[in-house]
Image (cartoon, rainbow, N blue to C red):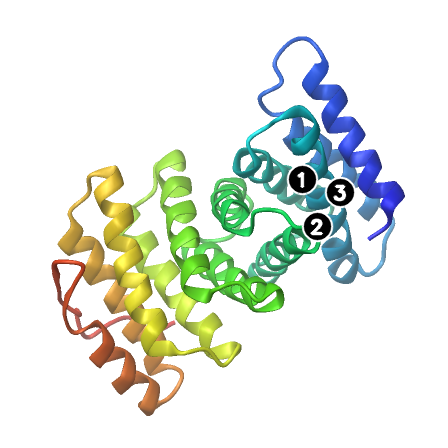
């Protein structure tokens, strides 16, 4: 990340915030323009995109400190703009979304930002931005979750806390675009388990954190907690079945019974992807 580019993003955001007219999406446009300018004519878009994301997020955090903007909202807008910019230049893939999420979280940690707030904003923004760019909801949500866990590992942040923030963000993003919240819970649960397996985390602990976090989120948006818990548990068990027999047994045991006062039911057979 270059200090010059970070400062350029920060200054653009500060200027937009002090201007007249509608400033609600200023971070979206600043991020979009930065990505398009940075990727035009570049041969290896895959390797350059994370660098740009790091510069943009660092600039957003710096600007938030100057203008008093809410970090989660600004990060969400910056991720929306980033993905829109990438889509103008190349095809947005699940791998690209995962890398963008991971890099945004790592960049937040690098500049001592509030990682948990950033995770929720990143997750919500990435989901809303990918509507209409050719990615399925399942691929998008799975990739967001997997990238979030890798970002948590990169920054030494508690995986369970990041998982809960990811669940909150993807549910909010789903509601924003009018999607199916229960399906989202299943997809994000799968991605969180797969990401945890990637980084060598405790799958049993993650599975319980996923279900508990889903129940907490469900109560906030008044959806049926039993349905939400079942979807979370089913997604976790489905993902664990693709890791190993040992993982399947451990995760199934972890999500069986009652969690946070809700009886959890794993629905089988579950769809494998």
Residue 79 in which image quadrant: top right
For marks 3 and 2, the one nearer the N-term is: 3
- Residue 190 % position (x, y): 37, 67
The numbered dot on residue 61 is: 1
Using the numbered discs, state the Cα–Cα distance from disc 1 to disc 3 in whole angstroms.
17 Å
Quickly name the residue at label 3. Answer: 35
The numbered dot on residue 264 is: none
Does the CB distance between marks 1 and 3 fall below 8 Å? Answer: no
The structure residue drawn at horizontal position 15% and vertical position 47%, both measured from the top left corner, is 224
The quadrant the C terminus occupies is bottom left
Q: Nearer the viewer, mark 1 or mark 3?
A: 1
Quickly name the residue at label 2. Answer: 111
Does the CB distance between marks 1 and 2 fall below 8 Å? Answer: yes
- Residue 85 % position (x, y): 69, 41
Task: Determine whether the residue tagged by mark 3 lies in a helix, strand or loop.
Answer: helix
Using the numbered discs, state the Cα–Cα distance from disc 1 to disc 2 in whole angstroms.
8 Å
- Residue 188 % position (x, y): 39, 59
Say left or right for 179 vs 52.
Answer: left
For marks 1 and 2, the one nearer the N-term is: 1
Task: Determine whether the residue tagged by mark 2 lies in a helix, strand or loop.
Answer: loop
- Label 3 neighbour load within 10 Å: few <14, some 14-19, many 20+: many
Say left or right for 224 vs 239.
Answer: left
């Amino acid at each position: 990340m270059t200090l010059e580019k970070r400062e350029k993003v920060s200054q653009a955001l500060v200027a937009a915030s002090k201007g007249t007219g509608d400033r609600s999406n200023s971070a979206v446009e600043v991020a979009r323009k930065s990505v398009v300018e940075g990727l035009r004519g570049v041969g290896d878009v895959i390797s350059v995109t994370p660098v740009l994301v790091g510069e943009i997020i660092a600039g957003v955090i710096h600007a938030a400190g100057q203008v008093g903007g809410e970090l989660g909202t600004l990060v969400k807008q910056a991720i929306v703009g980033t993905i829109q910019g990438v889509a103008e230049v190349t095809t947005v893939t699940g791998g690209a979304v995962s890398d963008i999420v991971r890099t945004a979280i790592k960049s937040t940690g690098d500049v001592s930002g509030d990682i948990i707030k950033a995770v929720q904003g990143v997750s919500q923004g990435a989901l809303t931005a990918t509507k209409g760019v050719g990615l399925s909801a399942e691929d998008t949500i799975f990739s967001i979750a997997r990238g979030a866990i890798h970002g948590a590992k990169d920054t030494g942040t508690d995986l369970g806390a990041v998982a809960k923030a990811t669940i909150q963000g993807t549910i909010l993003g789903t509601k924003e675009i009018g999607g199916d919240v229960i399906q989202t819970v299943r997809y994000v649960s799968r991605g969180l388990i797969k990401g945890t397996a990637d980084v060598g985390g405790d799958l049993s602990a993650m599975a319980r954190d996923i279900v508990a976090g889903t129940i907490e989120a469900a109560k906030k948006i008044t959806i049926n907690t039993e349905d939400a818990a079942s979807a979370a548990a089913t997604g976790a068990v489905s993902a664990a079945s693709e890791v190993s027999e040992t993982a399947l047994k451990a995760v199934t045991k972890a999500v069986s019974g009652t969690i946070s006062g809700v009886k959890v039911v794993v629905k089988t057979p579950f769809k494998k992807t």
